[in-house]
Amino acid sequence: MGIDYSQLHDPNAEYTMRDLSAETMGVTAKRGGGRDVEITDIQTTMVDGNFPWTLVRIYTDAGIVGTGEAYWGAGVPELIERMKPFIQGENPLDIDRLYEHLIQKMSGEGSIEGVTVTAISGIEIALHDLAGKILEVPAYQLLGGKYRDQMRVYCDCHTEEEADPEACADEAERVVEELGYDALKFDLDVPSGLEKDRANRHLRPGEIRHKAEIVEQVTERVKDRADVSFDCHWTFSGGSAKRLANALEPYDVWWLEDPVPPENLDVQAAVTQSTTTPIAVGENRYRVSELRRLIENQAVDIIAPDMPKVGGMRETRKIADVANQHYIPVAMHNVASPVATVASAHVGAAIPNSLAVEYHSYELGWWEDLVEGDVIEEGYIEIPEEPGLGVTLDMDAVEAHMVEGEELFD
């Protein structure tokens, strides 16, 4: 019986993924050699961290469960629930095939970018955990092996007086001395008290001097003990971003992040090419098709994808491969729970051009409680050797910190 391709994107179509696999993708429906495992269910629970983390669990008829995480975003759990029929009954080892199928089936919801890609990312990460457990290998092995045993972590820092250069320097020194990090990030889109009209994105000379003073004091305080980057959160106009980046050239800036809004790649490229201050961009782009344009247009010095948002572990690996062809390093943006943080570390271990993975929750005292065992030690993540991601949820901690109205996994 032939396939009616008009029904490809119809969730009520009679054809299953297994039909499509057998007839159009050349994959044998009957599998042996330990591969006879089927997905039976997908569930989500949202945890109320410093962001609403969406944890994802994929269940199988073999009793093996995979855990993943999607970047926070309204509607992500509902999208994952909608995708459940598309992969139930499927073999979780076929990660690429299932990923592409979800992209196709969810095209109507916008699977090129946005929360649909984010939802698929959470499923894809859980599939890596699940496949690693089935095959009894760590997740990095599914990505081709590892270049390093530890992944460097950069700590996103905050103070009660974020606009005070000395307070920022004090916090930088504390995080280095007391917490053991040798990589930091501070915000530069903080008020200076000199703003007249923030809507026009223009930086007055005094505002630039204020931001340069933050950079000067922080970098001088830590000197060679830590690399320091600074985040602008897409705040400034092209001209102001150029003047700010030029003003920071005398200082040891690891990178200046997202100085202009993300939509116009030509402006982004012009800013990056106007300065010797390294520019990092990428967390507001989706999949390799979008980030490739940043890389090939020489619009970035450092690419910064957010793994549980951009498309998942293998998509981030693809982005890193393109970046490596252009001799551009990867610094993964990350505001996740320990689950996606460790998943990002697996990706970082498996690519040659990895700089660091972000940690955004150092002020949240229970962050590591969500999983059993330590995650970050002295500013580094030891890459787990256990099958899958190598992290186990502490269900008591998850339940204690769930978003109101959420239900714990079965």
Image (spheres, helix red, strand yellow):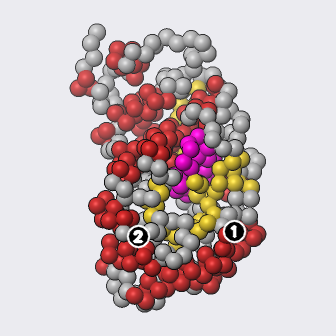
Vertical side of 404 occupied by 325: above or below:
above
Specify whether 236 is left or right of 316: left
Q: Which residue is mark 2?
A: 275
- The percent position of residue 381, horizontal first and vertical second, equals 69, 50
Q: What range is drawn magenta here? A: 330-354
Vertical side of 147 occupied by 332: above or below:
below
Mark sitting earlier along the chain (1/2):
1
Query: Please, what secondary structure does the residue beneath circle 1 have?
Result: helix
Numbered badge on residue 225: 1
| Dot 2 crowding, Cα within 10 Å, few <14, some 14–19, many 20+ | some
- The percent position of residue 167, horizontal first and vertical second, equals 63, 82
Residue at left offset 66%, top offset 73%: 223
In the rendered structure, does residue 294 fall within the stretch colored magenta? no
Rendered-image quadrant of the N terminus: top left
Which amino acid, by three-letter code, is at mark 1?
A: Arg
Res 57 visible: no
Q: CA distance from mark 1 to mark 2?
A: 25 Å
Vertical side of 84 occupied by 109: above or below:
below
Rendered-image quadrant of the C terminus: top right
Front-most of 286 and 16? 286
| Dot 1 crowding, Cα within 10 Å, few <14, some 14–19, many 20+ | some
Res 33 visible: yes
- The percent position of residue 325, horizontal first and vertical second, equals 44, 44
Determine which quarter of the picture holds residue 395: top right
